[in-house]
Amino acid sequence: MIHTTYGIFDGDSWEDLCQIIFKSKYKDKQYQEMVASPGDFGIEGFTKLDGMAFQCYCPDTNYTQKELYDKQRDKITKDLEKLRTYENEISRRMGKTKIKEWVFVTPIITDNKLLRHAQAKQEEVVKWGLSIIHPDFKVILQDADFFATEINEILTAKGKKITLFSALELASQAEEKDVSEYEENISRKNKVRCTFNGVLNEEKHLKLNRLTSNKWLQSELFLKDIEKKASEIYFHVMRVINQYESEVEELCITWRGDAEELISKVRDELAQRLGEATPTLGEAERYRIADQMTSKWIALCPLGIE
């Protein structure tokens, strides 16, 4: 899954959203979806009137800039090659329509080297001389901002709120860092929690590390499930979490009490605020979210334990 200013997406949800956009935005150009059955031919759909072909790609996670570029570059190369491999099959489906623009649609683009790669592949495809390729063939890159109006209209129609903060704010601390760093944060802070009378209980320390890590990793999946099943509740939950996270950092700076008292206060306070903002959300769900977010903050450092 990847966090964007328009929400959280994986490959399937991004493609589903794109198909809704294409069918609405390009219906007058006779857009046709290319269902990936009985095969994936390197395009998700095309317009019969002007030869625009679309291919969607969503990263699996919030990669570093270099990792994202490598993934997007390789995806473009692989899918353009399919035009040559499946030329005859594509021709049978597109008829007399020739591909004039092959549009690569992805949530975010962070490296302008992708433009350079797209230009090089464009020139290469033209040289193939395929029957399905227009002489003025172009490779076009588009991110989510190209479809901002359509995305917000779709989210509104589904009952979701248009937010002024980005979902990236909760995940930004996780970008371009090794997971081992978070494991070190968890271990370091849990040492304080498992030290009694100056002696570290190593067995409890290891168990607590595993428990904290599991809760942290489960947090995004649980929130994603809430987003799918109750988008209105999800909006309020994320707003509360985002606001309280900044307060937690300040609370930790001035805290004078015991580490466990601090964690209990953060967990209980978040659960209380979630209850006030989302009275229709069950108590068990509120405390589960609060518990998981507390573990996440231990890993990502807003919750400091010294």
Image: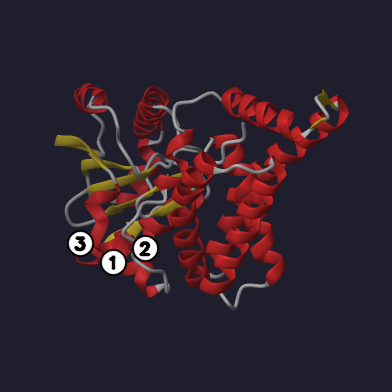
Question: Residue 97's x, y, as percent?
Answer: 23, 49
- Residue type, numbered disc 1: Ser
In the depicted view, which residue is nearer to us: 289 or 24? Answer: 289
The residue lying toward the viewer, choosing from 23 and 90, is 23
Q: Name the kind of residue labelled 2 in the image.
A: Ile
* 169 to the left or right of 268: left
Q: Dot 2: few (<14), some (14–19), or many (≥20) neighbours within 10 Å?
A: few
How many angstroms separate mark 1 from mark 2 (CA)? 6 Å
Mark 2 and 3 residues: CB-CB less than 8 Å, in contact?
A: no
Q: CA distance from mark 2 to mark 3?
A: 15 Å
Residue at image position (36%, 63%) is 20
When asked about the image quadrant of residue 105, the answer is top left
Q: Residue at x 35, y 62 (%)?
A: 163
Asked whether disc 1 touches disc 2, contact meaning CB atoms under 8 Å apart, the reply is: yes
Residue, disc 1: 24
The disc placed on residue 29 is 3
Spatial CA span between label 3 and label 1: 10 Å
Percent of width and height locating residue 136:
12, 36
Residue bearing the label numbered 2? 20
Residue 53 visible from this viewpoint: yes
Q: Is residue 166 above or below residue 269?
A: above
Q: Between disc 3 and disc 1, whose residue precedes? A: 1
With 122 as the anchor, is 89 left or right in this view? right
Whether residue 96 is visible: no
Q: Is residue 91 above or below residue 280?
A: above
* Labelled disc at residue 237: none
